[in-house]
Structure formats: C-alpha cells, structure tokens
Amino acid sequence: MQPSNLGIGLVGTGYAAKLRAEALMTDSRAKLIAIAGGDIERTQIFSQTYRAIAYPSWQDLCDRPDVDLVIIATINQDHGKIAKAALQAGKHVVVEYPLALDPNEAQAAIALAKAQNKLLHVEHIELLGGVHQALKTSLPLVGNVFYARYATVKPEHPAPQRWSYHREQFGFPLVGALSRLHRLIDLFGKVTHVTCQAQFWPPTLPTPHSPLPTPYYTTCLCTAHLHFQAGLLAEVTYGKGAALWQSERKFAVHGDQGALIMDGDQGTLITAAGSQTIAVGGRRGLFTRDTAMVIDHLLTGSPLYITPEASLYTLRVADAVRQSAETGQAIAIETA
Ligand code: NAP
Ligand code: BLA
C-alpha cells in the first residue's frame, strides 16, 4: 500500500471522534473521507471542519470502496454491530472500548477479523496514560501485592440525559467503563471470581402508582471485588451522577514491602524508607498516540500495545461483574 492512501471512515462526532479526526488531519499517510454521527445536522457541521463527507448512516460509510479503515467512536450499544458490518465489508476496524457489550458478540468479531485477514484494534488509551505507566514501573518496589483499590467517582449536577446514563446505550457501568477493570487485569493477570453491588437512582422516585419506566438513571454506583489467581483482592468503585458529592480518582496498591498511591495525577510510593513522590505523565494526547500506532501498524507492521483478545478477557470479567450485581452471587471466571 502506498503511503497517504489509507482512507478512513469515522463513526461518531463526539469527544473521542473529534480527537481522532484531529489526529488524522496531522498524519499525511491517512485521509479522513467519510463521517457518520447520530444527528445528521451535527454530522454535517462536524464533517465540514475536516473536509469529509457526512453520511446519515454508518452502513453507507462501510460501503464506500475508498474507505480502508473504519474508526468506531460512537455509543457503546452500537460498537459490535458496526464492527461486524465493517469487517464483512472488508475494512480494517478500530473501535473505542468496549468492542461490544456482549462478550460472545466481541468474540465473533475477533473471529471475523481473522477470517477476513483485517485489523481489529480495540482502543485502551488508559494503558498509555501516565498513571498506568507509573504504576507498572513502580509495582516491583512494593513486593507482593495483597490488595488494590481503584475508585473513580464523578458527581454531575444535574445528571445529563445522555447516552452515558442510559442502561442500553452505555451498557452495564463496568462494561461501558471497561478501562477500570482492564487497568487491574493488565497489572495483576487472571481473575478467579468476582462479586459486585450496583445501585441506580431513577430521575424521580417512582411510587407504586406512578412508576417511571425510563432507560436513563441519574446516578450509578458500582463496587466490585475481583479475586485474582495471583492471590490479591482488588476493589473497584465506579460512580457518576447527581447523588454523588465528591469527585475521586484514586488507585492504591498495597504490598508487603510498601504501597503505591495514585491520587489524580499525583503519585506516592511509601516504603520502610519513607514516602516519596513519583513522576506521573499526563492524560493528554492519548487518542493521537493510539491513532498513530494504528497507522504505523497498518503501513509498516509495527506492533500495537494491546490485542483484542486481552480486551475480550476483560469484557468477560466485566460481564461476570454484571451477572454478580444482578444475581447477588459470586461469579467464577472460566479459565480459557
Ligand atoms: P460523546 O462525546 O458523547 O459522543 C457520542 C457520539 O455518539 C456522538 O457522535 C453522538 O452524536 C452519538 N450518539 C449519541 N447518542 C446516540 C444514539 N442514541 N444513537 C446514535 N448515535 C448517538 O462520547 P465519547 O466520549 O466521544 O465516547 C464515544 C466512544 O468512545 C464510547 O464508546 C466511549 O466509551 C469511548 N471512549 C471515550 C473516551 C473519552 O475520553 N471520551 C475514552 C475512551 C473511550 P449525536 O449527539 O449527534 O447523537
Ligand atoms: C474515558 N471519558 C471516558 C469515557 C467517556 C468519557 C464516555 C469512556 C467510558 C469510561 O471509561 O468512563 C467522557 N470524560 C468524558 C466526558 C468528560 C470527561 C464527557 O472527562 C467531561 C469533561 N476525557 C475528557 C478529558 C480528559 C479525558 C477532558 O473528556 C482528560 C484530558 C480523558 N477519558 C479520558 C481518559 C479515558 C476517558 C484518559 C480513558 C479511561 C481511563 O483513563 O481509564
């Protein structure tokens, strides 16, 4: 393939899509050809900025012969079916996590990509971020890890009625926000079993006489426990919405030789020798790096930083977390 002729179709016009489009503008080896969003007027305005053709539907975008790669940056509910359609049309695919809400649909997409001999890349920018890199570097300094805790809490007043507060469009919270579990699995390996409690707040309190069936919640709060084969316990708290009052982004790792505490972008290592600050890189430019790695991979064969199988494994754990929240039972993770 000649440089500068990687034709790109982009599905989505939101935050992730904008960063993808901007990354593509600065790479002469790629050309953003077509964009399909939700609302057609917004798609047209968005497409003008990048001199791309606006499409009312992602199906038409997948049919364009000059599109070699489809980037899926839209609501989670649609990821799996768009990936399938794009692969069937013979396109390479990049999809923002999660690959699909249903692990079996994700597995089928991976098999389809192999059969079609096309790239299927699931973005996990959290692995490229400063906090994760600093954790990986410093982990050996705390000895045997017995406990990790990762909490991300985001108050939103009022809670927006958008897809990320919609049960079907976002998916189960720890499936939609798959990066929370993926960080832990990337650090600590395979999981034996999980438990989870999930709470959802409706917009107004339903009464027996006027229950309000709505797919939107105004707050979700999930706490999951992951038991790892390596022996440690990890506790994950994920919450967002109007019932929450203090934001938190904290990753703590406790080992027999010390502890690592990441609070926002501040890193601290505590050992018998005392407490020291550790350098943590930022969270900016991660979509740009992911995009560049994909183009490099397609044009030169250079390696990527994650396999779709690794993302699928985390998706299976996340789906077990969902089952635990729904049944109140501990759920075992099958060993592959
Ligand atoms: P966003 O800014 O809210 O954009 C969402 C996109 O989906 C917009 O194009 C929106 O278009 C469209 N959309 C909304 N509701 C829709 C519906 N019901 N049917 C069809 N399309 C609809 O979201 P985002 O943050 O970019 O997230 C996009 C994807 O990237 C998600 O899978 C997310 O998990 C993933 N991701 C995001 C980040 C991040 O930093 N933001 C990081 C990692 C992964 P309209 O408004 O015109 O409908
Ligand atoms: C992840 N951010 C996400 C996701 C969504 C948003 C939907 C995927 C689902 C999830 O993992 O939670 C949406 N993030 C937002 C919105 C805001 C936000 C609407 O911060 C509003 C301010 N994302 C940003 C900004 C940064 C950012 C400004 O919008 C920081 C520079 C980073 N978002 C970011 C990163 C991830 C993410 C790095 C990957 C998840 C992770 O780090 O674990």
Image (cartoon, rainbow, N blue to C red):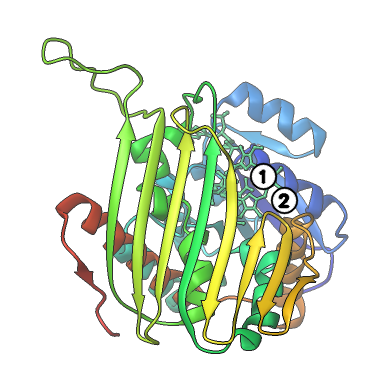
Q: How far across and down, in percent of the image, does residue 88 sit? A: 44, 62
Report if residue 190 is visible in the image: yes
The residue tagged 2 is 20
Most extreme residue toward the top is 209
Q: Cβ of disc 1 within 8 Å of ligand 1?
A: yes
Comparing 105 with 290, the one in front is 290
Say which mark, if any, is on residue 64: none
Comparing 62 with 129, the one in front is 129
Comparing 264 with 81, the one in front is 264
Ligand 1 found in image quarter: top right
The amino acid type of the residue labelled 2 equals Arg
Report if residue 123 is visible in the image: no
Q: Quadrant of the N terminus?
A: bottom right
Distance between the Cα atoms at labels 2 and 1? 5 Å
Q: Residue at x 22, y 17 (%)?
A: 206
| Left or right, residue 330 beside residue 7 | left
Counting other residues with Cα less than 10 Å from the Cα at mark 2, is it few (<14), some (14-19), or many (20 or more)? many
Q: Residue at x 58, y 41 (%)?
A: 247
Counting other residues with Cα less than 10 Å from the Cα at mark 1, is it few (<14), some (14-19), or many (20 or more)? many
Above-or-below relation of 201 to 179: above
Q: How far across and down, in percent of the image, does residue 72 sit? A: 56, 51
Above-or-below relation of 214 to 137: above
Query: Which element is circle 1 on?
Result: helix
Q: Residue at x 51, y 88 (%)?
A: 144
Asked whether the residues under the numbered discs 2 and 1 touch, taking CB atoms below 8 Å apart as contact, a structural biologist would say yes
| Corner quadrant of residue 189 | bottom left
The amino acid type of the residue labelled 1 equals Ala
Say which mark, if any, is on residue 17: 1
Q: Residue at x 32, y 25 (%)?
A: 202
| Left or right, residue 301 beside residue 114 | right
